Image: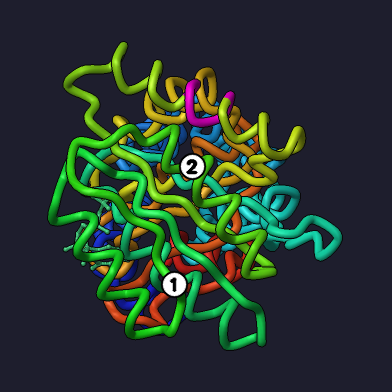
Amino acid sequence: WQRLRDGLARSSSSLSQGIGDIFTKRKLDAATLEELEDVLIQADLGLTMASRIAGAVGKGRYDKTIEPAEVKAIMAAEIEQVLAPVARPLEIDASKRPFVVLVVGVNGSGKTTTIGKLSAKLVGEGRKVVLAAGDTFRAAAIEQLKIWGERIGAPVVARSQGSDAASLAYEAIEQARSEDADVLIMDTAGRLQNRAELMAELEKIVRVMKKVDAEAPHAVLLVLDATVGQNAMSQVEIFGRTAGVTGLVMTKLDGTARGGILVAIAEKFRLPVHFIGVGEQMDDLEPFAARDFARAIAG
Ligand code: GDP
């Protein structure tokens, strides 16, 4: 969490500064609250959250002065209330063998890296993990997953570039079964340039998985890059509709991302948030914790 705090501190310092500027030597009134809403919207928190926080700050305090620190504390509490119900661990149901996790998201969001980190965690807990290199469009993605597999000691089911991802899915479940694996994690392509094709492919993967195991995939994780800001919102909509997303992972929160977008997404979609990515290394995946995150954003 230190890396998250450092990352968000950099970006939330403008939010913190903004709150300081608004409330220093001025009384709380409609104008100051409107300014507060503006800085919250600029921090990607979204309209609904911004007015919710402004409402909570304003309650019973009109025409009084308020310390910026108190504004931040109220803000952290409101954010925590929204995040607490969605902060949920990824539960691996051991009765499903293998427990099939499909990982979706646009290219560059951090899918492959997240799969590597998550697998390392699961292997560390003593689970047997098989990986499937389902981003069959990019040779580099297949290679990258193989490198992770080797590093962690997880077999990787892969085919050559350009092969059909859905038949790879079929093959991967069969192989994971024959190896009596606990978990199968499948990577997918994320070419948003050709949206119709991508969505058709994801639907086909899911359909084919169900032929081998009617309940598969047991979890569909959408990986979101925090640095894309508002775009993350439409990604949740698109992938949610097509792939039946069951949970979220937000990556790159160690950088310049504002993080507020995760609050806006939680408020709007109420999907479980399982993990956050705070770096490129194996152990840079943290279980999502509502209070820590809320405090880091409020600064
Ligand atoms: P994919 O195309 O969705 O599979 O994305 P990759 O896993 O290849 O990641 C794209 C880039 O983002 C790579 O350079 C990763 O090292 C980097 N990356 C992934 N997750 C994180 C993260 O949490 N923090 C940082 N700083 N970089 C990340």
Direction from residue 224 to residue 67 in the image, left or right: right
Identify which residue is drawn at 29% across, 70% down: 254
Query: Which residue carries the number 2 mark?
Result: 169
Whether residue 79 appears in this view of the structure is yes
Whether residues under marks 1 and 2 lie with C-beta atoms below 8 angstroms apart, the answer is: no
Q: Quadrant of the C terminus?
A: bottom left
Q: x, y (%) of residue 4? A: 39, 73
Query: With respect to residue 102, does 179 lie above or below?
Result: below
Query: With respect to residue 18, does 115 lie above or below?
Result: below
In magenta segment, residue 206: yes
Q: Mark 2: which secondary structure?
A: helix
- Calculate the distance from the C-alpha at mark 1 to the C-alpha at mark 2: 14 Å
Near mark 1 (Cα within 10 A), the count class, few <14, some 14-19 or many ≥20, is many
Q: What's the residue type where badge 2 is placed? A: Ala
Q: x, y (%) of residue 199? A: 39, 19
Magenta region, residue range:
203-207
Q: Mark 1: which secondary structure?
A: loop
**Considering depth in this image, is 95 or 34 the residue closer to the camera?**
95
Near mark 2 (Cα within 10 A), the count class, few <14, some 14-19 or many ≥20, is many
Going by the picture, which residue comes out furthest to the front? 178
Q: Which mark is residue 155?
A: 1
Q: Which mark is residue 42?
A: none
Q: What's the residue type where badge 1 is placed? A: Pro
Indicate the quadrant where residue 38 lies: top left
Direction from residue 11 to residue 245 in the image, left or right: right
- The image quadrant in which ligand 1 is located: bottom left
**Considering depth in this image, is 220 or 43 the residue closer to the camera?**
220
Query: With respect to residue 255, does 228 lie above or below?
Result: above
Q: Main secondary structure of the magenta part?
A: helix
Identify which residue is drawn at 57% across, 82% down: 123
